[in-house]
Image (cartoon, rainbow, N blue to C red):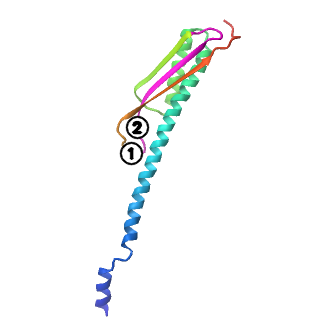
Amino acid sequence: MMATWLRRARTDERGAVTSEMAVVMVTFFAGFLMLVVFAGRVGQAENDVRSAAHEAARAATLAATPEAADARAREVVASNLAASGIACSGGITTNVDVSEFQPGGWVTVTVTCNASFNDVASLNVPGSRNFTASASEIIDVFRSS
């Protein structure tokens, strides 16, 4: 009687598919979760670069001279991207167009950041991606000169 039960227990495979499926599903969901984290990081980086360009353009319109506007825009871009935690490999490229710097004119700021994703949730994603954003702001017509 005991030998029959023991023999049946060693050859019985009921429940094996359930445990195998659990291992496969955990792996699948972990991979899917990491993909979601990566996509969120890409979206956040794109948003941060766009926001930095807009804030820099606005700050530049408040400066008194074109030189001060250029310097202020670069300062705002650097501080915003540093605060957001984006690591721009190769640095940040900031182009400030102050050719129309006069009341009623505009300032355009273009920001480019080559962001590396090596640190994303221990995914070890190779490479990087360029994020570029441009923003223009009109200089107040009624500003004092």
Q: Is residue 31 above or below residue 41?
A: below
- Magenta segment includes 97: no
Q: Which residue is mark 1?
A: 123
* Among the two numbered marks 2 and 1 on one chain, the one whose residue lies closer to the N terminus: 2
- Magenta segment includes 121: yes
Q: Residue at x 35, y 39 (%)?
A: 126
Q: Residue at x 46, y 25 (%)?
A: 112
Q: Quadrant of the N terminus?
A: bottom left
Q: Which mark is residue 140?
A: none
**How many angstroms separate mark 2 from mark 1 (CA)?**
9 Å
Q: Residue at x 36, y 43 (%)?
A: 124
Asked if labels 1 and 2 touch by Cβ distance under 8 angstroms, the answer is yes
Inspect the image, locate mark 2, and give the three-letter code of the amino acid beneath it: Phe
Front in this rendered view, residue 25 or 124 = 25
Which quadrant holds residue 3? bottom left
Q: Is residue 8 above or below residue 101?
A: below
Q: Which mark is residue 117?
A: 2
Q: Magenta part of the protein: which range? A: 100-122
Q: Quadrant of the C terminus?
A: top right
Q: Residue at x 31, y 85 (%)?
A: 8
